[in-house]
Amino acid sequence: MACSKPTGDMWQPKLKRNFNMKMNKKHNGWAVFVLSILLMACGNTGTAPAVVSDDTPTSGRIRISIDESFKPVIDSQIKVFQSSFPNAEIIAEYKPEAECLKDLESDSTRMVIVTRGLSEDESTQFEQKLGFKPAWGILAYDAVAIVTNKKAKDSTFTMGDIKNMLAGNSSYKYKVVMDGLSATSTVRFAMDSLLRGKPLGKNVVAAKTSPEVIEYVANDPNAIGMIGVSWIGNSDDRDQLSFLSKVNVASLACETCDEDAYVKPYQGNIALGRYPLIRSLNYIVKENYQGLGKGFVNFLIYERGQLIFKRAYLLPGRMQFNVRNMNIKQ
């Protein structure tokens, strides 16, 4: 059977199909191009952070809540960490301790830095909710410093003095200024560790922040303040030098010394347990994978992070700290 030559009408559907396929490819290409331009425009508003979307130990974005008492030293830690890992963004919010722990229950906060870890009951509750227990541990040891007015006659106190003033004993003329009357780590430390659950006296007054505690004491000769040593310990920090020009740091009686001694919240006295008002600084991170939270924790517990704690006059909790006896002749 002879094959006839296809007519133009018989070829028309094939030509039309080829033309349509070419046009569809062309339109699809333009669609992809336009969509790319729109996405670039949306992401270039000037407000989006310069971070990658992947959450790794050295990149991504994390929101953490931090006890306000440790703002100076944690600000330094974050600054060094982000300068080392420019694709990482740590959004730090400084709050009273109880609010930090409350934030940990929300999905938006994966890490907190506070003065206590989790109880077994709390760990179990998180495990039931998340399917795993958050990790926590000690970063450093802090001291609660007692600051007095420059004109105050008293510069040394026993622990009995501090406890009586916190309880409102009328034989003491001082007002005790704290960074809030509830929910803060300093208040919890005073009530749990010093007063053993008893209420604070009426002479205990509240300031909103640690700098406001210093300002209050600086303006009232009959007031003493309780603040974290990281606010006044770093002699290389201009702000802290300014604080020290306004108040004095009191000495407390050493209860573990063989001889009668009054000591200040120096690192050596914290390391040896000579200073009586010591508390730990802890991280709590709820990640069951290697994310930015665990990456920041690793930075804090190893050499660079521990040296930053040391510079801030806290006692590093992970790096060995050697104390040597010295005889000083005048």
Image (spheres, rainbow, N blue to C red):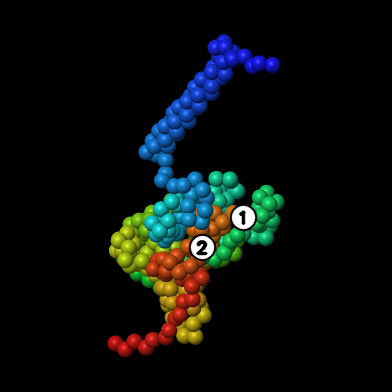
Q: Would you name the residue on which mark 2 appears?
A: 298
Q: Can residue 170 be seen in the rendering of this structure?
A: no
Secondary structure at badge 2 equals helix
Location of residue 163 in the rendering, given as x and y in whole percent from the top left corner: 51, 67
Q: Quadrant of residue 1?
A: top right
The amino acid type, in three-letter code, at marker 2 is: Asn
| Earlier sequence position, callout 2 versus callout 1 | 1
Q: Position of residue 282 (x, y in %)?
A: 54, 62
Quadrant into which the C terminus falls? bottom left
Alpha-carbon distance for marks 2 and 1? Answer: 14 Å
Between residue 32 and residue 257, name the one nearer to us.
32
**Residue at (57, 64) in percent of width and height:** 137
In the picture of the structure, the residue carrying the numbered disc 1 is 288
Disc 2 crowd, CA 10 A, few/some/many (<14, 14-19, 20+): some
- Residue 124 vertical placement versus 160 (above, below): above
Please say if the residues under marks 2 and 1 sit with CB atoms less than 8 Å apart: no
Residue 152, position as x, y percentages in the image: 34, 66
Helix, strand or loop at mark 1: loop
Residue at x 44% of width, y 81% of height: 323
Number of numbered callouts drawn: 2
